[in-house]
Image (spheres, rainbow, N blue to C red):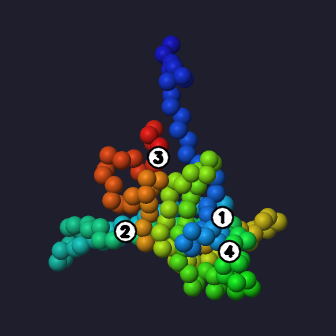
Amino acid sequence: MSGFNQQTLKYNVQNSNNVTVHIGDIPVAFGQTFTFATTFGAQNLYGVGAITPQEIQQLLASMTITVDAFQLSEQGLQYFNYPSTYSEVLFNNRFDIVVLDSQGNTKFTYIGAVCDNQSVNIPTNQVLMESLTFQAQDVLAANGLSIFAQPPTVPFVGFGPNA
């Protein structure tokens, strides 16, 4: 019966310990759960009378980040001169969002992020969960380079066996 050698399997599970939100070098907030998406602005181009696209162009790159359980840190409360309103904090500032691994090393940095959306999930008999969606100007990998400026041979944003 054929099998496999479990010793040769490379387990490379990536995880994130937390998310810190910075203005400059000051960690003003943190979050627990993090979701990242990139849209590339694909647009269909049609010929006269055609019902199917003749060409699809990718015109834009837009980075969206969702952070759950966003909380201001002590430094954030001092920076924003508490008691600022929550909406003032979210809608009048640009943030750098840093995703850290379990050892405290930077995995990703989202530059110039502005809050785009705030939503609250209110399930019955469960904890409320707030989600904030940000749009970022660029995403830096752990090596400090933009993920869009790296050669295609580099694994995406530090994932893979060489991470």
Who comes first in sequence, dot 2 or dot 3? 2
Q: Which mark is residue 31?
A: 1
Q: CA distance from mark 2 to mark 4?
A: 30 Å
Earlier sequence position, callout 3 versus callout 1:
1
- Horizontal placement of 50 versus 159: left or right? left
Task: Name which residue lies at 61% across and 61% down.
Answer: 19
Query: Residue 6 appears in which quarter of the rendering?
Result: top right
- Callout 2–callout 4 Cβ contact below 8 Å: no
Judged by depth in the image, the label closer to the viewer, 2 or 3, is: 3
Q: Residue at x 63, y 82 (%)?
A: 89
- Residue labelled with disc 2: 61
Query: Which SS class for mark 4?
Result: helix
Please name whichever residue, 129 or 10, is drawn nearer the observer in this view of the structure: 10
- Position of 42 with respect to 136 (left or right) is left
Q: Is residue 157 above or below residue 133?
A: above
Q: Are marks 1 and 4 in contact (CB under 8 Å)?
A: no
Q: Which residue is mark 3?
A: 159
Earlier-in-chain disc, 3 versus 4: 4
What secondary structure is marked by label 1? strand
Dot placed on the residue nearer the N-terminal end, 2 or 4: 2
Q: Nearer the viewer, mark 1 or mark 4?
A: 4
Question: SS at mark 2?
Answer: loop
Percent across and percent down for residue 44 are 28, 71
Mark 4 sits on what residue? 76
Q: Amino acid at mark 2?
A: Ala
Q: Residue at horizontal 57%, vertical 73%?
A: 23
Real-space CA distance between mark 2 and mark 1, rounded to the nearest whole angstrom: 25 Å
* Element class at badge 3: loop
